[in-house]
Image: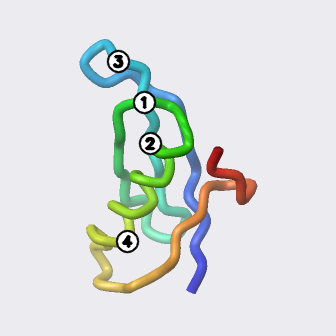
Amino acid sequence: MQIECTMEEIELDGIPSVQATCSHCDHVTESYGTGGASIRRCLVVMREECPCGQNNFYVADGGDDD
């Protein structure tokens, strides 16, 4: 199943970063950096850490991860 995640720019340890929030369960992942690779990392970690034990495909809201 494809699940949208809300992406938000945040700051981690004083470094510009991104945070993904799952639209289904509100699980949150964070990555340093704000580029496409950081966004993709958040989405991959979301899949690995799914608290519901599902094996979903996560996408950034709007479908654009660059």
Q: Secondary structure at mark 4?
A: helix
- Coordinates of residue 40 in the picture (x, y in percent): 48, 54
Gap between marks 1 and 4, in whole Å? 19 Å
Q: CA distance from mark 2 to mark 1?
A: 6 Å
Type of the residue with mark 2: Ser
Specify the label residue 47 is tagged with: 4
- Does residue 35 sit above or below 47 in this rendering? above
How far separated are the C-alphas under marks 2 and 3?
12 Å
Asked if the residue at tag 4 contacts the one at tag 1, i.e. Cβ–Cβ closer than 8 Å, the answer is: no
Instruction: Give the residue at mark 1.
Output: 33
Q: Residue at x 47, y 81 (%)?
A: 56
Q: Earlier in the sequence, mark 2 or mark 3?
A: 3
Whole-number angstrom distance, CA of label 3 to CA of label 1: 7 Å
Distance Cα–Cα, label 3 vs label 4: 24 Å
What residue did someone put label 3 on? 15
Quarter of the image with the C terminus in it: top right
